[in-house]
Amino acid sequence: MTPFYAFDAFDYTTAMVLGTILGFFFGLVLEGSGFGKAENLINQFYGDDMRVFKVMFSAIVTAMVGMGILGGVGLMDLSAVSIPVTYLWPQIVGGLLLGVGFAVSGYCPGTAVVATGTGYVDGVMTLAGILAGSVAFGFVYPALEGFYVSGEMGNLQLTELMGLPWPVMALIVTLVAIGCFFGAEYVERWLAVRRDHAPPPEAPAVRNASLGAMVALALLGVLSLAVPTTTEAVAERDIDTIDALTLAQQIVEQPTEVYIVDLRSAEACVAERIQGALCLTEEDPDAAFLADMPATRTLVLYGEGDLVGVPASAQQYAGAVFALEGGYASFTQAVLEAPTPPANPTPEAVATYRLTSELHGYFTGTASKAPPIQARPKAVERKVKKGGGC
Amino acid sequence: MGSTTNAEPAPYWNPYAAGFALGLVLLATYVLFGWGLGSSSAPTRLAVAAMDVVAPAYTEAHGYWGAYVAGGENPLQDWMVFEVIGVFFGGIVGAYSSGRMQMSPAVDKGPRIGSGTRLTAAFAGGIILGFAARLARGCTSGQALTGGAVLAVGSWAFMLAVFAGAYATAPFIRRLWR
């Protein structure tokens, strides 16, 4: 099941190496597109050569259609894909400003990196400006804080907005994009005649093959909707969640009432796991053994974080099935790390603190006496939502 | 203009074929990681790392930068930073292999301005880019391309705004380019 990283298929170092390799190909394609040279980017905005638009929308269509197909045939869990959160107003104003910066500098951030690699000093200066602009944003941020989070709409996608499944939306976007490509070529030729210069070189055969492939894949995506997937079968049974503290109490008080199964990689589980948890083995990475287990206990499953799905075998488990909220990370934080006394000692907070201290002692073997509670001023916390992307 | 490796650089890729290839790279990123490509957060992280050296206490307490360095975290130890290092080397290999590499530092500019004006404009435009990318939580890579491919509403609004902003600006700065 993909995305692989969401299912713990490889570790941090591998992730960084793969990220560098993917970036390498990203840079290679940007350079091949001509985007290491400002002239080729700026031509878009004078209508002389619209390759920025053509490359960008072909890429969007290809990735979008590809994900639609993989999701449709059940190879990719589209719900595990990160969708940028919409903050409409800062995104529109930021977009307008970025367009101004694009036209003035001749680059956008990614292409400035490629231009720097190609040996253009204007690319280097653009990058230096981007650094300065990032710092400037930080200094102005306190004044913009309210605006920065305005127009929040969550992970809203066009599919939800239009009430259409991903592959159908992808087909519509593909057809609109292709219409726009022919429109762009028409404008290029028209302006070339008016301005008395040669239009950008055309290669109808390559264009038709590329666009034909996109349409064929988009249609395949729509067809893939007819493929029954295991993902749908999994979704039939609702898995309740259990929080780390409740699970910890359960382990202390009635350990024989639960089966705990660690769904992380065998390696991670062998290194450290929740006390009493069963690890997956190399022979049975999909936890098929669960289907045959007697339903005498409650089954608790956990991954590194929240589980994005449970194995099909767990669906067949006859007893109650729970997923650990926040996964092993949450358990570590709640129980294995020494609790800190509450800053604001309300009776509830103190009771929780006593409980976590006891559990912490039990699971770590320190069993230390809880330190006295000190009244401290309440810390002001501000949670900043960071743009994941670019 | 600096000298290039060959007298005749290779032609650029067909834009649709290049877009198809870029789409496959983006798709591979989503399949492997569940997220997409980006660019502007790497320079931002570099800026935060510099701020953290110059004024660590201020940076850690800062409402925006604090999250990048929370818990003594190194802001440069991030997937996106590695990815952008890859972009840089991909650009070099692409330029070198196609004969487009500028073997001595070059300036790409319009015919009516000098290099000084061009470099000043590049820096000024860069400042706007850097600021705008943080305000919008991403740039043409992380928002328009990546968010566009997963049909995020805000990313599409951002993308249309980028084109609108650039088209609205272009006529006023013709001197820089034409």
Image: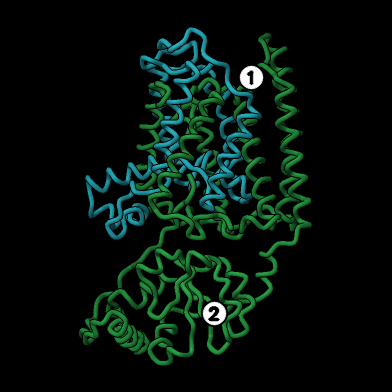
Chain colours: A green, B cyan
The correct choice, above or below, for A317 with respect to A8 in the image is below
Q: Chain of mark 2?
A: A
Chain of the residue that carries numbered disc 1 in the rendered image: A
Q: CA distance from mark 1 to mark 2?
A: 60 Å
Q: Is residue A172 visible?
A: no
Q: What label does residue B107 carry, if any? A: none
Residue A126 position, x and y percent, is: 41, 29
Q: Is residue A388 visible?
A: yes
| Horizontal side, residue A36 vs residue B56: left or right | right
Q: Is tag 1's residue or tag 2's residue first in the polypeptide sequence?
A: 1
Amino acid tagged 2: Phe
Q: Secondary structure at mark 2?
A: strand
Q: Which mark is residue A48?
A: 1
Type of the residue with mark 1: Asp
Task: Say which quarter of the image contains residue B134.
Answer: top left
Query: Which numbered disc, 1 or 2, marks the residue closer to the eye?
Result: 2
